[in-house]
Image (cartoon, helix red, strand yellow):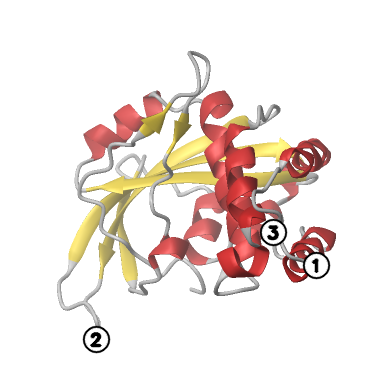
Amino acid sequence: MRRNLLFVFVAVFLFASCRGGPERRILSPPITPDEAGLIRPFVITDYRNRASGGNMPEWVNLWLNSTIQDVEALASFNGRFVFISRNEGVHLGPLQLWREGFSPELDFPRLAAARIERRFASVTSYPDDEYGAFYEALIKAASDAPWTGAVSEDDFWVRRRYIPDEENEQELETWEYLILLSIEKDLFTSQLDDVFNRVNPSPNPTIAQTEATNRVKANFFNGF
């Protein structure tokens, strides 16, 4: 398991929402395993339809044990980028309510912004210094952009038991809900270009910061 042997305990996962108008909703994304930075081995103790003999979908297995790029490599997502919204807690009921309130149109911007942010941060430990004011302005522009074309493909829940290790002595079991969305790569790329064009940083980045930004933009989808 290369990526998702990671964990953060979320006892309360009500989202803080910011509204730019009656038709806009930008939600603070839940902390993801990548952001948590904590590595813990786990076992799956339950999942949807397990009691009736069902299996976990292939995309869930890949995401739990691998990377989002491996999910995108599935034939069913050819020509599309995949995004997975994740939430977890100690009870399944609130997670199901979160799923019922999820909207691809309203909630996709935060997923796009978070992945764009991770791409820029992946090449430096100090993105604010590396890119200057452009970095914060980019994330805001991506969060506020009117993204279109994202569709909800599937959703699934699992229950994980995290095994005690050297850094974490307590065994813990939580529910985790995953929502899978996809968007055509060409459509996402064209909208990303619009986001880049809307970025208006203040103060203006230095020459070195602009060069660092342009290097990432030139190879943006390598490792995206």
Q: Which residue is outermost to the left?
A: 170
**Label 2: which residue?**
166
Q: In x, y percent, where is residue 11?
A: 20, 50
Q: Which mark is residue 211?
A: 1
Measure the alpha-carbon separation of dots 3 and 1.
Answer: 19 Å
Residue 49 relative to residue 82: left or right: left
Q: How many marks?
A: 3
Q: Quadrant of the C terminus?
A: bottom right
Q: Position of residue 1 (x, y in %)?
A: 48, 73
Q: Nearer the viewer, residue 7 or 164?
A: 7
Which dot marks residue 224?
A: 3
Residue 67 in the image: above or below residue 125: above
Q: Residue 89: x percent and y percent?
A: 25, 47
- Which of the marked residues, 3 or 2, is nearer the chain's N terminus? 2
Query: Between tags 3 and 2, which lies in front?
Result: 3
Question: Which of the marked residues, 1 or 2, is nearer the chain's N terminus?
Answer: 2
State whether residue 83 appears in this view: no
- Residue pictured at 32% horizontal, 68% vertical: 42
